[in-house]
């Protein structure tokens, strides 16, 4: 009796609807998706195989170590860690995988920032935009990460580009949120001061709000980069190359040893990336 | 023509402010409107005009609407009703572009908590107003440096605001406001965040600067001392309304209502200051030696319209006026006895400021300070006001 009340409405076809929408998008926007897939794919391949992999590893390691030394305020810790860590990855024969992962992370987080900061600014400037975007961000972040792999494959097939796409959805929210937060945190008096002297909206943004919000925005970008890395690893499931793929194939073959080594490689990369973005923040704040 | 004229300027915060204005029309109080409609009345029908070169002080207790009013003047807050004329143009009805032009060229603001840009150097802070006008780099630097020099900060231009003391930070705030050479300066409790000594120093400096630059200044304060020291005219605010506008003297002498009176009592330093602290050495004539001719000559020398008359032992005999002395000279009257007047306002050394104040505002001539019948000194109206305004320290050595 009570159960029949629950069954009063037949199952709502949400899954079918989603599928239908995805199909529809794929069809209608293939003019958009296909060139993105092609050009971005080519560019990323070029970047990893024809640029990063051609740099002799020793030069790459020294360059990273030098940058580490300077951005950490001429301390040796991070530089030493970078040398040892990167050398270990090289030593284990994962250098090319590392370069693929680095390419994915750089492109994915760059795009996240390019898209995320303007949305953050929009949210800060308009209450309506904030009210609309906030729940969308919540939704984007609470979905399990690999769910995004499905539309990514639908739109872009397999390879690096769908990996970047999935990472965009998953990793952009912190940049948007922190940009919004950073701008809203700028003291009311400073905003008044800039208005009182006759600033235009753009002058206020670039001369006062963004400089003041920079530290907060950088904290958001740091999170975005870390999320990108985690997503890029997951994206190996849809054929994105890199360290993640090694973990995945070890998993499929129950190969604990290589899985562990590839995992350590990811951790090393994560630590280096995290410290780099954090230090850039500190230096400028 | 006044530089700034506010007409019926009102601001009501909250939803449906026009409705709240109607309730104001019906005579409801600020409190009642908050209860009934949920609106806060920030400013209620403020009308005043400020002349060129004037320091116009707006004074009131915290929450009386001063900050709101000053922000209505440059439209950092949108008025609910009324107009603000600057050089005859109505700011309240201007489009954004014209509003920016007015803000860039005609008025600058100095903030209570300085509101300096912490990431910019002192020089870059002072340049800000010119920078948003896209002035050429050279020019903007020159003008900013000049403004910083005016406020005595020439040596600090490459430091960041955080490295300076509060007083110095507010000098930067002032320089930033002066750099684009505005007609009008809006100063919202500009010195309230400073400690008393620095505060006084800044007041003096503003007076100094003003004597050479002759800006039109609207100065907000909650402090009567400050208002009296700085203001050419003072407007008193209560619950969003302006309750009285007048010169410092008018405000002190004729407080418009209890509220103003209470304010004035606040400044009454009767407990510490008495007649002896503010009296001056009197100019007198000696009844035993001098006649109308000498008296007249002395009055002319000193620029006085009346003078006290004493004998050789400084016993007070009365006073004479210049008019009487001149008539006496014409009629060839040789001594002062005949024109001597006796309706002298008298106090003794220990008389309190409050009493002196009551006596002096009815009196056309200075108050005489008497001890054992001898004239010790005189008190003029100006020194009472100055003392009330907190300038008395300078004269305490006189006692
Ligand atoms: N943005 C605002 N929203 C609502 N009420 C405000 C706002 N700003 C000021 N008020 C109210 O308006 C009144 C006047 O405030 P204000 O102008 O800051 O007074 P003052 O500067 O004299 O201390 C106060 O009751 C205050 O609470
Ligand atoms: Mg205030």
Image (spheres, coloured by chain):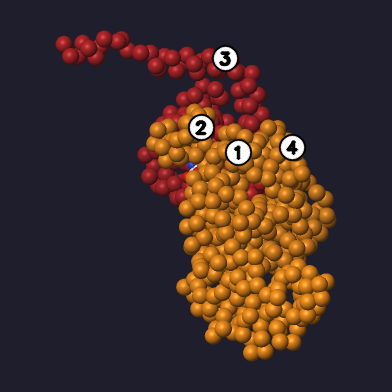
Chain colours: A red, B orange
- Residue B212, position in %: x, y? 78, 62
Q: Circle 3 sits on which residue?
A: A27
> Circle 4: is it few (<14), some (14-19), or many (20+) Cα within 10 Å?
some
Q: Which residue bears the numbered disc 4?
A: B89
Numbered badge on residue B25: 2
- Chain identity of mark 1: B
Disc 2 from disc 3: Cα separation? 64 Å
Check chain identity for marks 1 and 3: say if they share one: no
Q: Chain of mark 4?
A: B
Residue B276 image-quadrant placement: bottom right
Which residue is drawn at the image coordinates 71% and 36% (left, top)? B90
- Subunit bearing disc 3: A
Disc 3 within 8 angstroms of ligand 1 (CB): no
Identify the chain of the residue marked 2, using the numbered disc in the image: B
Q: Tell me: A85 left or right of B381.
A: left
Provide residue A242's location: percent of width, then percent of height. 53, 40
Tags 4 and 3 both on a single chain: no
Residue that mark 1 sits on: B9
Which of A125 and A214 lies nearest the eye of the viewer? Answer: A125
Residue A187's place in the image compared with A165, above or below, is: below
Measuring from the top left, give residue A58's x and y in whole percent: 63, 56
Do callouts 1 and 3 mark residues in contact (Cβ within 8 Å)? no
Measured in 3D between alpha carbons, the distance from the residue under mark 2 to the one under mark 1, in whole angstroms, is: 14 Å
**Nearer the observer, disc 4 or disc 3?**
4
- At x 45% / y 18%, what residue is drawn? A18
* Circle nearer the viewer, 2 or 3: 2
Residue B393, how many percent across, how many down?
A: 59, 76
Question: How far apart are the two marked residues, 4 and 1, measured between alpha carbons?
Answer: 15 Å
Task: Examine the image and state in which quarter residue A15 appears.
Answer: top left
Q: Earlier in the sequence, mark 4 or mark 1?
A: 1
The CA span between labels 1 and 3 is: 59 Å
Tag 3 secondary structure: helix
């Amino acid at each position: 009796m009570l159960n029949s009340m629950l069954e009063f409405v037949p199952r709502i076809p949400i899954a079918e609807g989603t599928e239908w929408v995805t199909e529809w998008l794929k069809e209608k926007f293939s003019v958009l998706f296909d060139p993105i897939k092609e050009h971005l794919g080519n560019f990323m391949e070029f970047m990893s195989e024809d640029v990063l992999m051609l740099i002799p590893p020793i030069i790459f390691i020294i360059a990273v170590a030098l940058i580490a030394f300077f951005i950490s305020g001429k301390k040796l810790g991070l530089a030493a860690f970078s040398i040892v860590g990167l050398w270990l990855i090289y030593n284990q024969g994962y250098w090319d995988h590392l370069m693929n992962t680095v390419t994915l992370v750089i492109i994915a987080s760059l795009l996240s920032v390019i898209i995320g900061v303007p949305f953050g600014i929009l949210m800060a400037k308009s209450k309506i935009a904030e009210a609309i975007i906030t729940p969308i961000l919540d939704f984007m972040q609470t979905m399990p990460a690999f769910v995004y792999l499905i539309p990514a494959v639908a739109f872009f097939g397999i390879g690096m580009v769908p990996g970047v796409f999935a990472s965009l959805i998953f990793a952009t929210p912190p940049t948007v949120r922190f940009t919004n937060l950073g701008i809203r945190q700028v003291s009311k008096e400073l905003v008044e001061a800039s208005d009182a002297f006759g600033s235009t909206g753009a002058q206020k943004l670039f001369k006062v709000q963004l400089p003041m919000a920079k530290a907060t925005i950088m904290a958001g970008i740091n999170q975005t980069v870390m999320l990108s890395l985690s997503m890029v690893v997951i994206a190996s499931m849809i054929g994105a190359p890199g360290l993640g793929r090694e973990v995945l194939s070890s998993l499929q073959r129950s190969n604990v040893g290589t899985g562990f080594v590839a995992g350590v490689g990811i951790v090393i990369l994560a630590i280096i990336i995290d410290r780099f973005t954090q230090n850039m923040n500190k230096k400028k704040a | 023509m006044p530089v700034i004229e506010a007409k019926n300027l009102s601001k009501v915060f909250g939803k449906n402010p026009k409705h709240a204005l109607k309730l104001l029309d019906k005579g409801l109080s600020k409190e009642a409107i908050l209860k009934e409609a949920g609106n806060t009345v920030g400013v209620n029908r403020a009308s005043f005009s400020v002349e060129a070169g004037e320091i116009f002080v707006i004074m009131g207790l915290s929450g009386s609407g001063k900050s709101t009013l000053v922000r209505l003047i440059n439209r950092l807050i949108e008025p609910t009703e009324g107009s603000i004329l600057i050089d005859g143009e109505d700011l309240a009805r201007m489009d954004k572009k014209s509003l920016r032009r007015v803000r860039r060229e005609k008025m600058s603001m100095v903030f209570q908590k300085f509101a300096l840009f912490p990431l910019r150097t002192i020089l870059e802070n002072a340049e800000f107003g010119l920078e948003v006008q896209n002035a050429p780099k050279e020019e903007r630097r020159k003008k900013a440096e000049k403004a910083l020099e005016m406020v005595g900060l020439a040596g600090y231009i490459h430091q960041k605001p955080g490295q300076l003391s509060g007083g110095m930070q507010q000098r930067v705030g002032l320089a930033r406001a002066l750099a684009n050479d505005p007609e009008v300066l809006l100063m919202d409790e500009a010195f309230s965040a400073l400690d008393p000594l620095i505060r006084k120093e800044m007041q003096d400096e503003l007076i100094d600067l003003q004597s050479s630059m002759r800006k039109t200044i609207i100065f907000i304060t909650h402090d009567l001392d400050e208002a009296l020291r700085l203001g050419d005219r003072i407007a008193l605010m209560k619950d969003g309304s302006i309750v009285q506008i007048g010169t410092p003297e008018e405000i002190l002498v004729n407080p418009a209502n209890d509220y103003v009176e209470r304010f004035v009592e606040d400044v009454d330093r009767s407990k510490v200051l008495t007649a002896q602290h503010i009296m001056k050495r009197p100019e007198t004539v000696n009844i035993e030696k001098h006649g109308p001719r000498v008296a007249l000559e002395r009055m002319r020398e000193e620029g006085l319209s009346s003078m006290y008359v004493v004998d050789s032992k400084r016993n007070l005999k009365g006073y004479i006026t210049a008019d009487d002395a001149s008539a006496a000279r014409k009629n060839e009257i040789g001594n002062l006895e005949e024109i001597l007047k006796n309706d002298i306002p008298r106090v003794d050394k220990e008389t309190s400021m409050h009493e002196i104040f009551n006596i002096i505002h009815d009196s056309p001539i200075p108050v005489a300070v008497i001890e054992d019948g001898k004239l010790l000194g005189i008190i003029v109206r100006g020194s009472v006001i100055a003392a009330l305004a907190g300038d008395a320290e300078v004269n305490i050595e006189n006692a």
